[in-house]
Each structure stands twice: as C-alpha cells, then as structure tokens.
Amino acid sequence: MNTAGIKAAAYCLNFAPELALHHGGTPAQERMAKGDSEFLRALPRHAQTFAQAQAYAPNKTYIGAMSIEELVNVPAPWTEHAGTPTRFGKFGEIMPEDEFIGLMDICDVFDLIWLEEGFAQHVATRMAQSPVLGEKQLARLEKGHPAAELAETIEKHHALPLYYEDRVVGCCRRAHDTDENLEASIMLENIACKASGVLALLHLMKNAGMSPEEIDFVVECSEEAVGDAMQRGGGNMAKAIAEIAECGNASGLDVRGFCAGPVASTIVAASMVACGARANVAVVSGGSVPKLYMNSRDHVKKGLPALENCVGSFALLITPDDGQTPVIRLDCLGKHSVAAGAAPQAITSALTFEPLTRAGLKLTDIDKYAPELHNAEITLPAGAGNVPEANYKMIAALAVMKGQLERADIPKFATERGMPGFVPTQGHIPSGVPYIGHALEALKAGTLRRVMIIGKGSLFLGRLTNLADGASFMVEMPSEKTHPAEMASKREVLEELLAALSDVAANLQKN
C-alpha cells in the first residue's frame, strides 16, 4: 500500500476589513459601477472589530484555539455568543491588518508596496514580537515614504491606496505601464496571497519543529494567477513563498483547480513523497483579496455583520510514512472524472463511495467527513444554504441507497460524521483541508480511525467548460504491517545476505 504521512498543519487568518472595503471584489465592482451607493456607505457599519474577529468561534476553531467539539457547543448565532479574544492557536494566528500590510511589504521584492514612514515604524515595532518572523524577514520591511509622495503616486501613477483605521498608510504600485496583468489591483491580490501563504508556511515549520532548509518542495494551491501579458498564470507562487520563508533547498510549483485545488495538491505532494522523489513537501495556499466581503451585499441588506473580513491561508507538511504519523492512503483516492456528470449524486459517489469500495470499505467506515467547510453564518444569508450540512445529507442518502445505512439514521450520520462549517468563504480555503489539523490530533489520540477530506471545484467559472471538479483522500493511522519504516528494503536484505556469506567464506578458509 502506498502511503505518505501528514506531519503537521498550520492555519492563519489575516484580518483585513479595510482591504475588504476598498479592494474586495463585490465592493470594488459596486464602486466601479455606481461610484457611491447606499450599500457602500452602510458597509463599514457592519464591519467586525479585530477583537470581535478574534473572539468569533469559527475563527478560533480555524487557528486551533478551539476544538470542533467546543464549536458544536457554542449556541447559534455565533456572532452573538463571542468568547475570549484569542490571537494565537495551536495551528496559527489571526494577524491584525496593520501587521498584514507590513507583511505584504516584507514579501514584496519589486518595491511595489510603499508604506507611509510613520506607519512603517509602527508596524516594525509590532512585528518584532512575531513568534515566526526572523531577523532577515523583519529586515526586509522598508523605512517608508513621506505621505505627500504616497499621495502623488496614488493620484498620478495609478497606485492603489492601502488603508488602516480609515486613513491611507501605504499604496500598491503597478508593475508595468501597459500590461493589465501587472496592474496595481492584480499585484495587490498576488502579494496578499503570497504574504498570507508565507505566514502559514512559517507557522507550519514552527509546528513541525523543522528548519526551512529541510523543506524539499512546495506545492501552492491558491486561485491566483501569477504572470504577465505573454504568459498569464505562468507562476510560480510556490517558489516566491519559499524564497521569503528562507526555504533555500526547496523548489516548487503551482497547482490550480478552483476549490478542488487544495485536495488535488495534497495528493500531488503525497505521491511525490510516497514514490521517493521528495522527502518533505509543503502544501501551501495563500488567500484571496477579491473574495473579501464577497457576500456582504446580502449581509448588509439583512442587518448582519459582514464576516468575510479575513484573508485565509494554510499549510500542510507531507513526509514519508514513519509508522507513527497519520497517513494518506494513495489506494483510496476519489476523483470526479469527465464522464461522471454534474449531478450531485454522481459527484458524491465518485468522491466517497467509489474510492472506499476499491479499498474494501463502506461509507460508514469513515468516522468524519470534511467536505466544503463554509461557515453557514456567511452562506445562509446569501442564499447559498448550509453547504457542509447538504454534503453530509447527500453522503448519508448515498449510504442508504447502497444498503449501508438505514434511512432513519440519516440525521445521526450527518451529526456524528460531520461537523459545522467554520471556514471563511475564501473559495479554495474551506475545501476540506482546514479539518486536517484537528483530524491529526484525533487520529493520534485514537478517538477517530479514519477521516475523508473532500474538495470540489466549480470549473465553469473560468468559462472554458461546464464541468465540475472534485478530489478526495482518506487519512488514517499507519498499519503496522504496511508502513515503510518497519519493512526492510530489498537492498538491505541483500546486504545482510552478502555479509553472512562473507562470514561463511572466511570461516571455510580458516578451516
């Protein structure tokens, strides 16, 4: 059986309500179409404070400051039952917006992010306290520019203003005079994605107790496109992230698949490790600026908090099976094939029933399913329903159809083998992978035997196909009979035999 271990996970949120207000996709399109509107005037009144974002139960669950079980016990709506504000969790952190702007400057290698000199000094002091940023990274933070120079660059040279606490504290400049792929808005998206990915990778190495030099390869799976007019989307976000994280021995590549990208990327990384091509592969994803405040129009209309205020990121460390680390079983992978069709039942079957059947397992042999883990407090007001709950009901209904579950047990199946969505609607970020950190702990503790991570993607958004996409994999503790750490290789056996024969030959010569 081919397996690869998941040694560690990291999850970070970068609080960014000003980025959301000025550069999030929905507000930006509204501003372009109408210049000003009641929606845009009302939106700031619906914003969370940083303390509220830190106290919000789904956010705390994402960074590992709360368990899934603790989240289940928080009464709904979660916005009205805040806990203690927490910046750091066992998996990562919720970074405030001033520091995130500073981190974008640290990650900028073409002098595109400019900071106002007073603000640069302010964030330098704040970021010096970071548990993951090193001296070399902190030294990259610029000294800053006079406010008048920023104003001129914004007014005359097409730079985008960066705000903090309702004042301009910096700008993002365009990288080319005529190439729309390098205009300021695209560069801001990509630098924010890069910065959030760097933060997750730094936390991953801290969580794993691993030095940057030990990372062999980085697979990046966001939804951003890096390139210019001649090769839009050419990449390589992975290597750009590895550079800032000081992973000097690493190379990397980008994998794209909309919301199915993270699961597909993890399979790519696990395959590299299992076949011996790489030893330590980091799967990393930064987040999305355009998806900030994506559904805010509906939230404002219904008088609710605008919760899409964080740029999400995550990182996983894939390593060889050592007999102790939970493993991905590469003989139990789900895929949504071209011929599978777009019906929800067909997609669910392709991603759950079919791979499990090949592995000799039933749908009821999985203790926890982690599909699209969107926070329902964001999606329900926008008319998108409770996405995780719908997935669990579909899997349970499939189990009934296959004779593996009684119809009366569907609600119990969804409750016991599912979980509430706790991830911001950052597209690819909610797609199953945010549960892995919690799953690793439960598998090691023996409270779970197997979990399945499911990713789905809406490929039609790119207007090249009407097909959907999807991928899945199963994680369990390694089998004592199959993990490589306890199996002698053919070479080792041969060496032992040769040594024994040499001893026999030597004794014969003596006699």
Image (cartoon, rainbow, N blue to C red):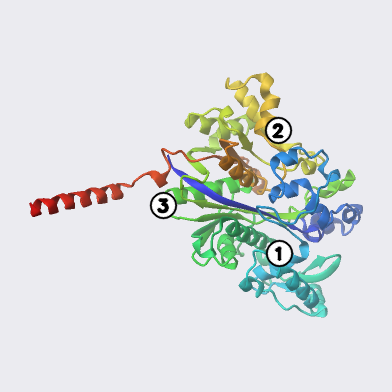
Mark 3 vs 2, N-terminal side:
3
Left or right side of 481 for 140? right
Image quarter where the N terminus lies is: top left
Give whichever of 426, 92 is nearer the camera.
92
Residue 102, percent from left and from top: 72, 68
Give whichever of 494, 98 is nearer the camera.
494
Q: Amino acid at mark 3?
A: Gly
Residue ID at (78%, 44%):
378
Q: Is residue 239 above or below residue 47?
A: below
Mark 2 vs 1, N-terminal side:
1
Q: Is residue 509 above or below residue 192?
A: above
- The image quadrant of residue 101 is bottom right
Left or right side of 339 for 194? right
Q: Which residue is mark 1?
A: 188
Q: Which mark is residue 276?
A: 3
Give whichever of 12, 75 is nearer the camera.
75
Q: Residues within 10 Å of mark 2 (few under 14, many from 20)?
A: some
Q: Amino acid at mark 2?
A: Ala
- The image quadrant of residue 363 is top right
Pair 3/2: label in front: 3
Residue ID at (83%, 47%):
82
Q: Amino acid at mark 1?
A: Leu
Cα distance, mark 3 to mark 2?
39 Å
Q: Is residue 340 above or below residue 242?
A: above
Element assignment for label 1: helix
Q: Is residue 195 above or below residue 63?
A: below
Q: Is residue 424 something that shows in the picture?
A: no
Q: Residues within 10 Å of mark 1 (few under 14, many from 20)?
A: many
Q: Which mark is residue 390?
A: 2
Element assignment for label 3: loop
Pair 3/1: label in front: 3
